[in-house]
């Protein structure tokens, strides 16, 4: 049989290869030791595992396909050999990576739902930001006209109208980063094998958020900045 490093640790054997152990009243020679793997739930710790040919499972064969060969072609050749020795029995197969991925089915569903609500929240935020920009520009129409008459540039007016929204976006980002990091880190602690949260993710999100904010507010602010000041100062 082959055992994992965890099994050797539990058994207290430093050099298990070549040792004979008894399992179900049968002697087994340990011919190799493998790295620990996740066998059951992704939330559980490493389990001690042994690998040997079980008589009650001789109808199951584990195979590693040649990575240089087309998968469809390889399966076709395997099926030919299988039907030669197992006449009348269906040829059924499963891929290890697909079976392994099923362990994270719940997380994938949560991820898809989170993405959906994230896009929805972004859409609502953009509409709200656009509405506030329009309202601010309309409210300060006469001020913009006076500033233009006094020599203010389009860039200066854009900074005047956009600065407040950019500052609010920056403050919200500063608040959101530690909260998101805390909850994401707590979620990762549920897994025995986990990655770490990289800082570049927050940098990228911050850059995208800033560009999105500037893009949304620039349309209306530049429109207000290039408007004819005579019309904005006209007495109603």
Image: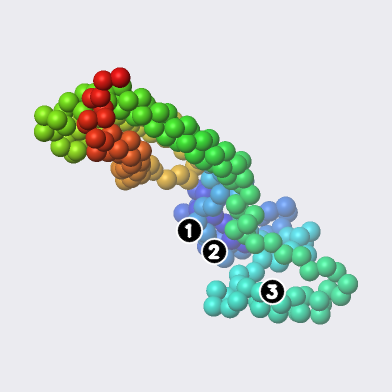
> Mark 3, mark 2: which one is toward the viewer?
3
Cα separation between marks 3 and 2: 29 Å
- Whether label 2 touches label 1, CB < 8 Å: no
Q: Which residue is mark 2?
A: 32
Q: Few, some or many C-alpha atoms within 10 Å of disc 3 (few <14, some 14-19, many ≥20)? A: few
- Residue drawn at x 45%, y 36% is 122
Q: Secondary structure at mark 2?
A: strand
Q: Few, some or many C-alpha atoms within 10 Å of disc 1 (few <14, some 14-19, many ≥20)? A: few
Up the image or down, 74 lies above or below 215; here it is below
Mark sitting earlier along the chain (3/2)? 2
- Residue drawn at x 24%, y 35% is 228
- Whether label 3 touches label 2, CB < 8 Å: no
Q: Which image quadrant for residue 176?
A: top left
Q: Secondary structure at mark 3?
A: helix
- Whether label 1 touches label 3, CB < 8 Å: no
- Residue drawn at x 23%, y 25% is 233
Cα separation between marks 2 and 1: 10 Å
């Amino acid at each position: 049989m082959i055992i994992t490093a965890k099994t050797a640790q539990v058994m207290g054997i430093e050099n298990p290869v070549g040792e004979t152990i008894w399992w179900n009243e049968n002697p087994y020679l340990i011919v190799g030791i493998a790295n620990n793997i996740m066998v059951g739930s992704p939330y559980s710790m490493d389990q001690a595992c042994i690998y040997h040919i079980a008589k009650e499972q001789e109808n199951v064969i584990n195979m590693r396909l040649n990575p240089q060969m087309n998968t469809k072609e390889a399966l076709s050749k395997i099926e030919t050999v299988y039907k030669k020795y197992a006449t009348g029995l269906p040829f059924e197969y499963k891929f290890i990576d697909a079976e392994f991925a099923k362990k994270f089915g719940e997380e994938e569903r949560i991820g898809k739902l989170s993405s959906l609500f994230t896009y929805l929240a972004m859409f609502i935020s953009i509409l709200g930001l656009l509405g506030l920009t329009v309202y601010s520009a309309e409210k300060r129409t006469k001020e913009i006209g006076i500033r233009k008459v006094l020599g203010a540039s389009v860039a200066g007016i854009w900074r005047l109208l956009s600065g407040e929204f950019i500052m609010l976006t920056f403050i919200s980002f500063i608040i959101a980063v530690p909260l998101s990091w805390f909850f994401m880190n707590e979620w990762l602690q549920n897994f025995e094998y986990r990655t770490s949260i990289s800082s570049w993710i927050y940098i990228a999100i911050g850059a995208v958020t800033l560009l999105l904010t500037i893009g949304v507010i620039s349309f209306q602010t530049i429109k207000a900045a290039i408007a004819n000041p005579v019309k904005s100062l006209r007495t109603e």
